[in-house]
Image (spheres, rainbow, N blue to C red):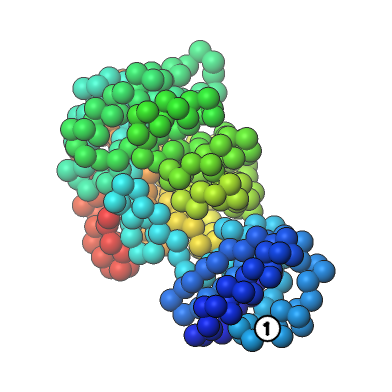
Amino acid sequence: MIVVLKPHAAAEQVAGFCRELESMGFQINDSVGSDTHILGLIGDTKALSESWVLANPVVETCRRVSEPYKKANRKFHPDDTVVDVAGHKIGGGHFVVMSGPCSVESREQITYVAQRVQAAGASILRGGAFKPRTSPYSFQGLRAEGLEMLQHARTVTGQPIVTELMSAEHIPLFEEAGVDMIQIGARNMQNFELLKAVGKLQTPVLLKRGLSATLEELVMSAEYIMAEGNPNVVLCERGIRTFETSMRNTLDISAVPMLKKMTHLPVVIDPSHAAGIAFMVPALAKAAVAVGADGLMIETHNDPAKAKSDGAQSLTPDQFDTLMATIRPELEFFGMQLN
C-alpha cells in the first residue's frame, strides 16, 4: 500500500503514525520527493482498512499496489534514484559511460585502455577479473591477480572500477580491492543467495538482465538486493535471446522506457553484449541515448583481434574516441549531463 501524506504534515504526527504502522508489523519505505511525501507499506496489507488509514490527519490519500516489487517500484519512489559511484552520478539526468576490456589480461593492457577511454570521456573503468564462460575450457579470467591490475589502473587514472562478482565467497577479495561497483552478470541475475549477499553491502550494484528474463523478473532481482538494505542498484539491458541468429543477442531498446515506468532505478545499456559485433555498437549506443538510458557500458580493447574474450564485439580505442565524439552532442540535445 502507498500512503501519500498531506503537504506540511507535522513531523511529530507523521512519526507517530509510522510507529503505529510498524507496531502492526509493516516495514515502511519513506520517500520524500520534490513535491510529495510517500510512505510505502511493505507487508500483508490485506487486513489494513483504507478507511482507517485515511482517517489519520496526516494522510492525503492511499492506494494498494498490485506489483510484487515494492522498494524498486516507481509508485513507492516517484523521483528518479541517483546512484553515486565514487563521485560519478548515474540517473536523474546524469549520464555515465563505463568502458574497458571484457577481460583484464595484463597490467599494461588494462592501464593503457583505462587511460584511453578516460581521455575520451568514460568515467568508470570496466574489466573482468572473474569471467563466466559458456565453455569450461575458455579463458576464465586472472581472478585475484586481475583485481590487483584493476587497482593499479585506478591508481594511475583515478577512475572507479566495476567488475563482475560470481560468488559470495569472493566478496572479501572485492572489499580488499576496494571495488567501486559490483557487477552481477546475466547468468547470475537470479542467483538469489548472491543477490542477498551484495544486498548486505552498500557498494553500488550493476545488475544485468538475464538472457531470457522478463522485465519484472529483472526488477524482482533488484528487489532482492534492496530488501537486504542496499538501495544502490543500476539496471542493465544487455540484449536478450530471440530467434534471430545474425547477431549475438537482440537489444530490447523498449526495455528502457518500460523500466523507467516500472521503477525509479537508473537504467544503462550494454550495446557490446547486445549485438556481439563491433560495427553495430555505435548505432545501438546512439539509440540508447535517444530512448532515455542513463548510461552505456562499452567494451574497448587495445587489440580486439588478440583479445582473450569477446574481441569481436570490442571497439578499438580510436573507435571509442569516435563514438564519444558522436554521442556528446546527442547528450546535449537531450539535456543529459555526461558525468
Q: Nearer the viewer, residue 282 or 180?
A: 180
Whether residue 219 is visible, yes or no, is: yes
Question: Farthest top residue?
Answer: 137
Is residue 104 rendered to the left or right of residue 132?
left
**In this rendering, is residue 47 above or below 268?**
below
Residue 320 falls in image quadrant: top left
- The picture places residue 333, in percent across and down from the top left corner, at 28, 68
Question: Image quadrant of residue 71?
Answer: bottom right
Q: Residue at x 76, y 80 (%)?
A: 52
Instruction: Give the residue at mark 1.
Output: 56
The spot of residue 314 in percent (x, y) is: 34, 34
Residue, x 47% and y 69% (percent of image)? 79
Residue 305 drawn above or below residue 251: above
**Which image quarter is the C terminus in?**
bottom left
**In which quadrant is the N terminus drawn?**
bottom right
Q: How many marks?
A: 1
Residue closer to the observer: 136 or 26: 26
Image-based side of 43 in relation to 171, left or right = right
Is residue 135 shown above or below 311?
above
Relative placement, left or right, of 287 versus 116 is right
Local crowd size for mark 1, using a 10 Å CA cut-off: few (<14), some (14–19), many (≥20): few
Position in image of residue 146 (x %, y %): 35, 22
Residue 103 seen from this side: no
Q: Position of residue 268 (x, y in %)?
A: 43, 51
The amino acid type, in three-letter code, at marker 1 is: Asn
Q: Secondary structure at mark 1?
A: loop
Identity of the residue drawn at 54% across and 18% down: 135
- Which residue is rendered at x = 30% and y = 68% of the image? 335
| In the image, residue 224 above or below residue 258 | above
Q: Nearer the viewer, residue 70 or 45?
A: 45
